[in-house]
Image (spheres, rainbow, N blue to C red):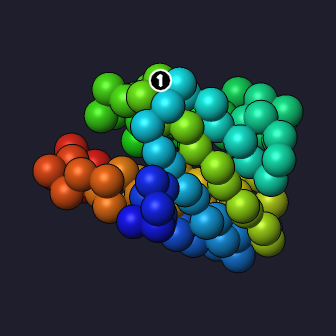
Amino acid sequence: MIGNWNYGTGRRKSSVARVFIKKGTGLITINGRTIEQYFGRQTSIMVARQPLLLTNNGEAFDIKVNVHGGGESGQAGAVRLGITRALIDYDAALKPELS
């Protein structure tokens, strides 16, 4: 934990995502843009949000992401893994649901 933020790193193909989460309203910001502005495909948005929906935390956290490298699909997968690791950093009891 860094201050009020929980941190997770996600890697997929050649993409790397640094994810910071804290309790909030459900706002997801990727490289300074909303998730809808950053990812052009609904599939990528769905992939990135999977860990939140799986743990019923869809609107519970504000998330800031820095992601680089690779294409849209790899970046979405990296964001998903980063969110998963940040959620486990927030509450280790979520690990069985996310495995």
Q: Is residue 13 left or right of 85 when viewed as pictured?
A: right
Instruction: Return the x and y of residue 97 as percentages of the image width and height.
Output: 21, 44
Taking depth in this image into account, of 75 and 87 the one nearest to the observer is 87
**What percent of the width, then of the height, locates residue 28?**
64, 37
Q: Compared to 47, does 90 lie above or below?
A: below
What residue is drawn where x is 80% and y is 60%?
A: 71
Height in image: 19 above or below 98?
below
Above or below, comparing residue 12 to residue 72 in the picture = below
- Dot 1 alpha-carbon crowd within 10 angstroms: few under 14, some 14 to 19, many 20 or more: some
Question: Is any atom of residue 47 visible in this view?
Answer: yes
Q: Which residue is mark 1?
A: 59
Give how far across and how far down residue 26 sits, in percent: 54, 28
| Rendered-image quadrant of the N terminus | bottom left
Task: Say what secondary structure mark 1 lies in.
Answer: loop
> Residue 77: in sight, yes or no?
no
Residue 5, position as x, y percentages in the image: 48, 56
Instruction: Please state which amino acid type lies under the numbered disc 1.
Output: Glu
